[in-house]
Image (cartoon, rainbow, N blue to C red):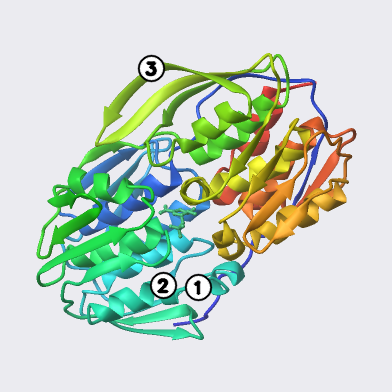
Amino acid sequence: MSSTITQQPESTTQIVRPARSFQGSVTVPGDKSISHRYAMLAGFAEGTSRLANFSTGADPHSTLACMEALGAKVVKGPGTSVEVTGVAGAFQQPKAELDCGNSGSTMRMLAGLIAPHPHTFTMIGDHSLTMRPMERIRKPLAAMGARIDLVDGHAPMTIHGGPLKAIDFETPIPSAQVKTAVLFAGLQAEGTTSLSEAVRTRDHSEHALKAFGATLTRANETLSIAGGQRLKAIDATVPGDISSAAFFLCAALLFPDSNLVLDSVGMNPTRASLLDVITTLGGKIKVLTVEERHGEMIGTIQVNRDEAGLKGAEISGALSAQIIDELPVIAAIAPYTRDGVTIRDAKELRVKESDRIALVAKNLKVMGAEFTEYEDGLAIPGNQQLHGAEIDSGSDHRIAMAFAVAALRASSENIIHGAEAAAISFPEFFPFLNELSKR
Ligand code: S3P
């Protein structure tokens, strides 16, 4: 065991010039959330899973590295495909810490999957991940009988694994990561675990568990999973990441003659409320094709801007939880709308890879925008012209990309510091943005 924190990558800068239109066709890389789940369950299952269009983001590759350390065999390529040979239900004692890098999903969801195994696991992350709340995972897993040590509620997290028993759990915060940790532990516990959520969060884990052969039932809002289940390898294709596509959807809203086609993008209903918000803001969305694979909807969509222009939106309640990852980019384009954008009930944004409310506010301010900051959101009036500025990504991928989009309609060029963070979920972002932006 060597260290308790991951090394940060070197900071790089990107210059983004204003554009006059946004046009073209693009296939965004595989979904980050689904790639994590397929990698984890493939690593746990018996047999070799072939995962096509696996995310190119650094986060799901942190998960793959952890699965290798736990005894799974991972072969990358050709292209973005990955082959994972699982441990048939028995993880091995890792020789070193499990390095989760910047990935909250890896640390939280994997904790549930490994806690029932009779080993000691230490999970570490980078500076950002070490600041993020982990008590939300420790609590339900401890109720199942797991012994987990944290440092003031944070990583490094040490799990003293062993047999778990089922619980009935009501998620106190809307979090798919917490739900997943409990389902992954419940899969291996003694008895039947039941779980209910006040706000329905993304259901990729439910679809993935079923795809790998688990039985999982839903009665009204309660999910049940029996313990002692074995999983079998699958061949699967990961849908394109709608949260990556969100940057281009918002960019397309900025110009009257935009025309964007997104190929093979994930349209799971628990993620797709983003498309309703894009429509409310003034996007015209045409679904060109749609199909289902392993319970996940995948579609090709075309987006233009409504003749009426960019309107405004009020985002609160369950909707804020459902589009939590897309809120930074929606906030970044808000000044260019006619009626402005209000975001409330989004306090969780403060404990993401950065305090995203504070960083959105900081960067809107340097670009010259007026707004009101709340503990749980922002109110950003419309009809504002922003100017170029020096943007601070705060090493947060979604902040770097959100303000690269805002830069397309600014009066002068923006300098994005910490642009390398985009690689956490979308390494191809800047070249794709450049190709689609017409100047
Ligand atoms: C994720 C769930 C969300 C989201 C994160 C990915 C997932 O987090 O913000 O980027 O894959 O389950 P929470 O579940 O903690 O809200």
Query: Given contact means CB atoms under 8 Å apart, are the residues at marks 1 and 2 in contact?
Result: yes
Label 3 element class: strand
Tell me which residue sits at (72%, 53%) in the image: 360
Which of the labelled discs sits on residue 98, or is there none? none
Q: Quadrant of residue 271?
A: top left
Tell me which residue sits at (84%, 48%) in the image: 370
Tell me which residue sits at (88%, 46%) in the image: 368
261 left or right of 392 in image: left
* Amino acid tagged 1: Pro
* Amino acid tagged 3: Thr
Q: Which residue is mark 3?
A: 289
Up the image or down, 393 lies above or below 127; here it is above
The answer to which of marks 3 and 1 sits earlier in the sequence is 1
The answer to which of marks 2 and 3 sits earlier in the sequence is 2
Measured in 3D between alpha carbons, the distance from the residue under mark 2 to the one under mark 3, in whole angstroms, is 39 Å
Label 1 element class: loop
Q: Is mark 1 within 8 Å of ligand 1?
A: no
Q: Nearer the viewer, mark 2 or mark 3?
A: 2
| Percent of width and height locating residue 245 | 54, 34
Q: Quadrant of residue 73?
A: bottom left
> Could you tell me if residue 219 is visible in this image?
yes
Count neighbours of disc 3 (C-alpha within 10 A) and say few if under 14, some if 14 to 19, many if 20 or more. few
Question: Which one is nearer the viewer's eye here, 24 or 51?
Answer: 24
Q: Which residue is mark 1?
A: 133
Question: In which quadrant of the rendered image does the N terminus lie?
Answer: bottom left
Count neighbours of disc 2 (C-alpha within 10 A) and say few if under 14, some if 14 to 19, many if 20 or more. some
Question: Which one is nearer the viewer's eye here, 396 or 73?
Answer: 396
State the count of labels. Answer: 3
Which of the labelled discs sits on residue 136, or is there none? 2
| Percent of width and height locating residue 247 | 61, 36
| Percent of width and height locating residue 230 | 11, 57
